[in-house]
Image (spheres, grey):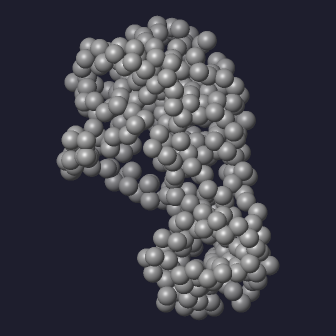
Amino acid sequence: MRVSFIIPSRNNLRYLKQAVESIITCYSTQHDIVLLDDASDDSTWEWIQSLEGDHFIKYRNEGPDRVGHTILYDKGVDISKTDVFTIFHADMITTPNHIPNLLKHLTKKAVVAATRIEPPLHPPGPEKHVRAYGFEPEEFRKDDFAAEVAVLEDLNGDKTTSGIFAPWCMYKEDFQSIGGHDPLFAPMELEDSDIFNRVYLAGYQLIQSRDSFVYHMTCRGSRFKDGIEIEAEIPLPDGTIWYKPKDSEEYKALRAIKFREWWRKWGCNVLHDDYLMPIVPHKYNIAFIIKNSTFQHLEVLEPWCDRLYLDDEMQLNTDHYIESEQPNTKFDLKKRILITTYNDPYSENDIILEFDGHNFTQNSYNIIQTLSEIITESGEVGTFELDCFKITINNMQTYEKDLIICNTL
């Protein structure tokens, strides 16, 4: 089966060249390579244009601003010509059995992930192998990597576990039927966790092939785009060292914004098991009524509910908050933050939390973050008290399955 490698890139040409070379070395022209340049200024587009062959499909965002890999992944899938595609990062290196050992597990309504081998730039986990075969293309120890892959393929032949992360593959039709990635998370960050939740809720099988391998230098187009600068060496319980790199300022700013978007959409933190299988709590319709609130309460709590009701004296703070926060979100904050005098929270919402801001503590915030699980466990319509909260449940309807199909608001 012919597969399309979908590879966005922005100013990381050194890694992209290595990725493409590995695909050609392993597969020649057997598979298509969809290359998408995101307004790079490092000669990426010039290099892409120099590539010859019908198996190369090329696209450029002319800019001047980037659109992000959240958008370009979907563009790549759209212009691909095969029934099956794989999301592939520009800082990955494929192996000869990577694609065959994915496809042997692929069916309709399934997503199959490969197994990453990567340097110790993130904490270890059972879903990957941490090995330092090189932090940069120039120092990649290709022969040593290939030798270990041969051993691991033999050891793990046909084994699978349940989980999902890049690189993953699926049928184009299945991807597009749920609307692809959500532009809410453009240009990047949490777009992967979002679509993983959605394919899970759609009932797709999430399979990790334990004998399909890539080497992943990790995050070279975003988190570590400014280069690897180790800011801490953290000893781990297994005796290894986590060489924690410094995150780019761009990444840290986007991460903060996109987590707030995630809370608004999903009403919980990003949750998964040790193998990165999504855990998706119920999504309820929840409102907060806060007396004696402050600007800080508004800033901290607004993303965690569907509507926030405040006293009259908070109108000026509300206006200031909306003015500063609205550019960072696609949600209409004027519909989310309301003044109690002019609205009836009890008729407009399924679940209501009432509390006095003077009594709100860190423990209260911890409860907010696990509120879905608490409501699910309560299991019934009625009123109860917890910490500083009076919680009224009018309706136990859940809405997480409404999020399966991408909704751009």
Q: Quadrant of residue 125?
A: top left
Q: Is residue 382 visible?
A: yes
The reply, left or right, for residue 376 in relation to residue 258 is right
The reply, left or right, for residue 398 in relation to residue 68 is right
Residue 356 lies, in percent from the top left, at 55, 88
Instruction: Residue at 56%, 60% (x, y): give it.
Output: 268
**Which corner quadrant holds the C terminus?**
bottom right
Residue 309 lies, in percent from the top left, at 65, 81
The reply, left or right, for residue 392 in relation to residue 194 is right
Closer to the camera, 99 or 223? 99
Residue 92, placed above or below residue 157: below
Instruction: Residue at 44%, 54% (x, y): give it.
Output: 254
Instruction: Residue at 40%, 10% (x, y): give it.
Output: 25
Number of marks in the rendered image = 0
Residue 139, placed above or below residue 372: above
Residue 395 lies, in percent from the top left, at 77, 70
Closer to the camera, 263 or 401? 401
Instruction: Residue at 70%, 67% (x, y): give it.
Output: 379
Closer to the camera, 137 or 187? 137
Q: Quadrant of residue 3?
A: top right
